[in-house]
Amino acid sequence: MKKIHLFFSSVLLVASTLLLVTACSDDDSLEEALGSKVQKVKLAQNTMSMVVGMNEQLVATIFPENAENQNVTWSSNKPEIADVDSTGMLWAKEVGSATIMVKTEDGEKVDFCLVTLTPAPILVSEIRLSESTLVLKKGESLTLIPIIIPENATNQTVTWTSSNPSVLSVDENGNVSALEFGNATLTVTTEDGGKTATCAVTVDNKGSLRVETVEIPAGTFQMGVSSFTEMGSQNDERPAHQVTLSQGFKMSKYEITNEQFCFFLNAKGIGADGVYNGKTMIISSEGQASDWGVHYNGTEWEPATGKENFPVIYVTWYGAREFAAYAGGSLPTEAQWEYACRGGIEDKSFGLGNGMTLTKNLANFNWQMECENGNMVMNGNTPSTSTVAVDSYTPNAFGLYNMHGNVREWCSDWYGNYAADDVTDPVGADSGTYRVFRGGSWSDMYLFCRCGFRNMPNPALRAVNPEQGDDKVGFRIVMPL
């Protein structure tokens, strides 16, 4: 029995060996046969981003590498956005996204690449600073704003450096601090293109006068009030007429402050009487019922404590005019003032919001009576009792603060009747008794804070001639572009 089993096992072993050899031989033939057929195709990237206007060669790898037929076709589902030619060269045409497909001729194996197209960068051509020279007072700080050209340049990153950091420091946002007496040059450099602009700075114990402005474009608007339906309108606000301002201008973003006016008074050497060239510029608020203005301390003028950024008050028309000239500008014409106040809102009472509302959260005026959507509303508010800082509340569409309320604002015009016809660049009456002021004050009802309201004649408002001032009158200035 053992011999039979041994013989049978030997037979099985021989048979298994023969089968294994045959199988190996068949596998080699199969691999050789399959080696000529495409199994798959693979793109080097399945997602990519490109800038419009650029091109890039796509690369497809066929597996196995020794496949006989390596022909492929390329296609785009959105050739108007990203197109591809027969060699796999991809062309970025428009902003958007497209899917590129590669397909083998043998076996129609496919792979895809999602391509995202972004706009071509807009390069920086120039950089400027709003100031090329500055005089700062030791301890003073301000922020310089770089002007990048074109304004829609893609990369607006800049770096700041000071030639003398011990005199003048500057951070990455252009915040400048005057540390010591001396001179330094500030340089701003664009990351794109390495464009530069400089500002030469002197640090002394006085500093210089600066008035921040916004640009007001040239334009045409309806000046005055067209009908009696606007609550509080006066006869002298009519007739409504078309006014064209042929030149754009810059207007001070804020009402002129106590600190700014003191700088002017001290620079001109004006003494305690506030008189310059025979005209009163200012009346000290010290000892007045409303002490929110400027004082003469025996050697120079200074703002009332804590009121540096409040609008100057008790300023005469002559004082406002002289300050404007010193700052390189003028008082606005009545037409410029109303155009700027309206902020592009036509034939409405106010230059804020919907043009028909003036409430406590929008301006500093007598809040006992507010206007909501053209209607008078008695809300029982405690009325305002003083001026507020010039950067309070929300600016109008031109970026101007407190055109309604806070202080009435001197204009350059003599008060007189409106022209009946359309006019261009009007400058008011040739002569008169009173100068125009506009905008209403902290103590005025909203009726006297409307865009179209004029100061005279109205028994509710005390007449203020050019040599007078009070705690309700201030000003802002304009400059040529």
Image: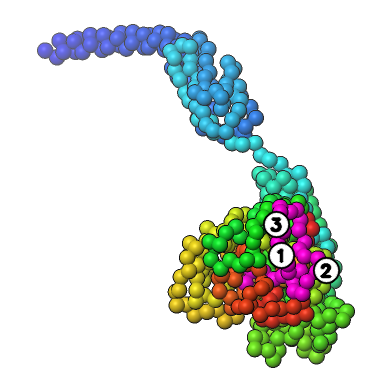
Which disc is residue 325 wearing?
2
The residue pinned by badge 1 equals 417
Point out residue 405 in the picture as x, y percentages from the top left corner: 61, 71
Measuring 71% from the left and 52% from the top, which residue is drawn there?
422
Point out residue 282 in the picture as x, y percentages from the top left corner: 77, 81
Whether residue 246 appears in this view of the structure is: yes
Point out residue 116 in the picture as x, y percentages from the top left corner: 54, 33
Crowd class of label 1 (few under 14; some 14 to 19; many from 20; radius 10 Å): few
Residue 167, image quadrant: bottom right
Crowd class of label 3 (few under 14; some 14 to 19; many from 20; radius 10 Å): few
User: Of helix, strand and loop, which mostly describes the magenta segment?
Assistant: loop
Q: Is residue 428 magenta?
A: yes
2 or 1: tag closer to the N-terminus: 2
| Residue 167 horizontal side relative to residue 81, left or right | right
Please, what secondary structure does the residue beneath circle 3 have?
A: loop
| Residue 479 horizontal side relative to residue 240, left or right | right
Where is 39 relative to 225, above or below?
Answer: above
3 or 2: tag closer to the N-terminus: 2
Q: Which label sits in the foreground, 2 or 1?
A: 1
Q: Amino acid at mark 3?
A: Ala
**Proximity of marks 2 and 1: CB atoms separated by less than 8 Å:** no
Along the line of sight, the residue nearer the viewer: 356 or 320? 356
Which disc is residue 420 wearing?
3
Q: CA distance from mark 3 to mark 2?
A: 31 Å
Q: Which label sits in the foreground, 3 or 2?
A: 3
Residue 398, image quadrant: bottom right
Measuring 47% from the left and 65% from the top, which residue is drawn there?
375
Measuring 70% from the left and 86% from the top, which residue is drawn there?
285
The stretch of residues the image draws in magenta is 414-440
